[in-house]
Amino acid sequence: MIARPRQTPHRLGRLAERRVLWHFRLRGWRVLARNWRPRAARNRGGELDLVVRRGGCVVFVEIKARSREQDLDSVLAPAQRRSIERAASEFLARAGIEDVSLRFDLVYVAGRRLRHYRDAWRPRD
């Protein structure tokens, strides 16, 4: 048996992002943005991994890649959720998108397993 070399975290993340991108495309979603950063994010984070749209629904997708499964509570902290929500708000304003339903999804990729959590959280108003 030949052992596969360990993947670097960056490579693992890029492969997971590509896999999730096709997961949505094959289900009829149109990709609006990948790895989108708001102007203010240079100082405090807030990248949107993937933004997709189908009809009147826009989904902001956070992608988490791990070499093995972890507890989901430790994967996405509340501060990171708020940061994603702020970036999503700026994305919508800059893109001129209005009157659509919004959703925040989490896609967790561990090894060969891909788990899609629709409506993983709701933004606080």
Image: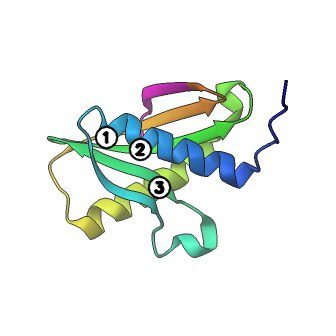
Ranked by sequence position, the earlier of labels 3 and 2 is 2
Examine the image and state in which quarter residue 66 appears: top right
Mark 3 or mark 1: which is in front?
1
Residue underneath mark 2: 21
Pointers 2 and 1 in contact (C-beta within 8 Å): yes
Q: Nearest the camera: 18 or 66?
A: 18
On the rendered image, what quadrant is the N terminus found in?
top right
Residue kind at label 3, given as amino acid type = Leu
The image shows a total of numbered marks equal to: 3
**Secondary structure of the residue carrying numbered label 2:** helix
Q: Earlier in the sequence, mark 3 or mark 1?
A: 1
Q: Residue furthest front?
A: 1
Q: Is residue 124 visible?
A: no
Q: Residue at x 63, y 48 (%)?
A: 13
Amino acid bearing label 1: Arg
- The type of residue carrying mark 2 is Leu
The answer to whether residue 1 is left or right of residue 118 is right
Q: Main secondary structure of the magenta part?
A: strand
Which region is colored magenta? 114-125
Say if 82 sits above or below 27 in the image. Answer: below
The residue pinned by badge 3 equals 48
Say left or right for 58 vs 51: left
User: Which of the numbered marks, if any, corresponds to residue 25?
Assistant: 1
User: SS of the residue at dot 1?
Assistant: helix
